[in-house]
Image (tube, grey):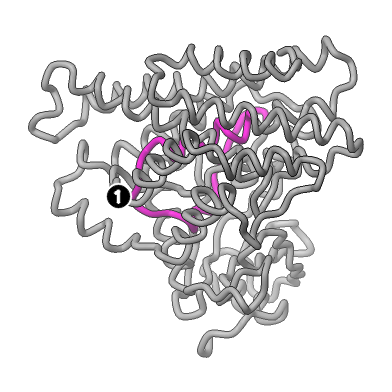
Amino acid sequence: MSAYHPLSNEEAIILAKTIPGFFPEGAELDCREIGDGNLNLVFQITESETGKSIIIKQALPYAKVVGESWPLSLDRARIEREALQVQHRLCPDLVPEVYSYDDEMALTVMEDLSDYTIMRHALIAGKVFPHFADHIGTFIARTLFFTSDLAMDPRAKKEQMGRFINPDLCKITEDLIFDDPYRLSDNNNYPAAIEDEAEALRTDKALHLEVALLREKFLTRTEALLHGDLHTGSIFITEESTKVIDPEFAYYGPMGFDIGAVIANLLLNLAAQIGWKQDEADRRSHQSWLLQTSLDVWTRFEAEFRKLWDEHAVDPLAHTPRYQDVYIHKVLQDTAGFAGAKMIRRIVGLSHVADIDTIPDDTNRERAQRLALTIGKALIMNCRKIHSIAEIDDIVRTAAGNRGEMI
C-alpha cells in the first residue's frame, strides 16, 4: 500500500485478495463499510459464491465521533493489533485471529465474526447467556495474570509495557471517566431532566475524593496489560461462544479496570430493564440474572486467577502467606470503584450506552438514568470498604431500593 490514507471499498478488496490462502484466485468479492464506532473504519469483505468473509479495520487520524478537531495517533492501530495477538495467544477460543496487518496504513486484517451478535444488542433484546461469566472471567484472568509481574520476568514485562504506551486513548479515558462528569465540561451530554443529578455530581466533594483515588490508580498502576475498553459493545457472543474485540485502548494499568468495565455494562443493562420489560415479575427476574452474572464474572475471574497464581507464578515472593489474598482483595475493591465510575460516565458524559439511550419512553428512560447513577455512586463510595463480592450484590440492591426500584 502507499503512504497512509483512508481506504476505499475498492482498495479494501484489493488488499483482501493479497491475504495468503484465504480467497481463491479470481474470487468475486463484495465490500461494505460497517464501522459504527467512534474511532475507526471497518470493512467487511465477502466472497459472493461461498459467503466466506474477512474484516479489515483501519484507524483514522482523528476521533470519528467528533471529527478532525480531535486528532489521534495512528499508532493505536499497532497497539490494538499487538494486544489482539497477545490475547489470542493466551485465549485462542475467546479472541479473533489476526491474519495480516500494515502499521503504516494503520490497519489490521482479522477474522470476521458475522455469525455472532454484539452483546449489547443482544442484552437490549432480553437475551441471556449462561456461559458468558465463565468465558469472560477466564479471558480476564488469563490476559491479566500472564501479562503481570506475577507471571513475567520483570525485565520482559517492562519491555512489553513500552510497546503499550497509549497516551492519546488513555487521555480519553482520563477525561471522560475521571474528570468531565464531575465538572462543567463541553464534553458532557445529558438531558435537562437530570440536571439535578449532574449538579450533585459536580458538588459532592466526598465523591470527588473517591474518584480522585481511582484516577490515581488508573494513572500510576501498571499491574497488567488491560483491554482498556471492555464493554458489551466490544464483545461478540452466541449462546455457546464469546469473542472479545477492539482492544485499541490497551495499556498497562490496574486489573480492576477491565473487570469493573464488564460489571458496569451488565449493571447499566440492569437499570435499562425499566424501559424494556413492562411486566414487573419478568423485569425483576431478568435484573436478578444480570446482577448474578456480574457477580459470577468476578467469581470466575477470582477462581481462575488463583489457580494460575498457584500453578504459574514466577515472582519469588508470590507464595508468601496471605499475599494472594491481599492482592485479590485490592483488585476487588478497585473493580467496584471502576465499575461505578464507568456507570456514571455513561449517563452524563460524552458517550452513552444504547441500552438506556434507546428506551422509547421518556419517563422510563429517566428512571433508568437515575438508577444507574445511584448504583454507580454507591459502588464508588463503598469500594474501599468491600471485602467480598457478595457485598456488591447488597450495594446494588440497596441502591435500587433507595430509588424505589426493587430487584
Q: Looking at the image, which is closer to me, 171 or 289?
A: 171
Q: What residue type is labelled 1?
A: Thr
Q: Is residue 404 magenta?
A: no
Residue 143 falls in image quadrant: top left
Magenta residues?
Answer: 239-267
For the point 84% across and 30% down, which residue is it?
275
For the point 15% across and 28% down, which residue is it?
318
Relative image position of residue 336 (x, y in whole percent): 47, 28
Relative image position of residue 304 (x, y in whole percent): 36, 24
Q: What residue sits right under mark 1 in the picture?
A: 220
Residue 128 falls in image quadrant: top right
Q: Looking at the image, which is closer to me, 237 or 354?
A: 354
Relative image position of residue 1 (x, y in whole percent): 53, 85
228 in relation to 131, above or below: below
Q: Looking at the image, which is closer to me, 12 or 152?
A: 152
- Name the quarter where the C terminus is drawn: top right
For the point 82% across and 35% down, which residue is it?
365
Residue 236 falls in image quadrant: top right
Q: Is mark 1 on a helix, strand or loop?
A: helix
Residue furthest bottom as drawn: 2
Q: Is residue 366 left or right of residue 249?
A: right
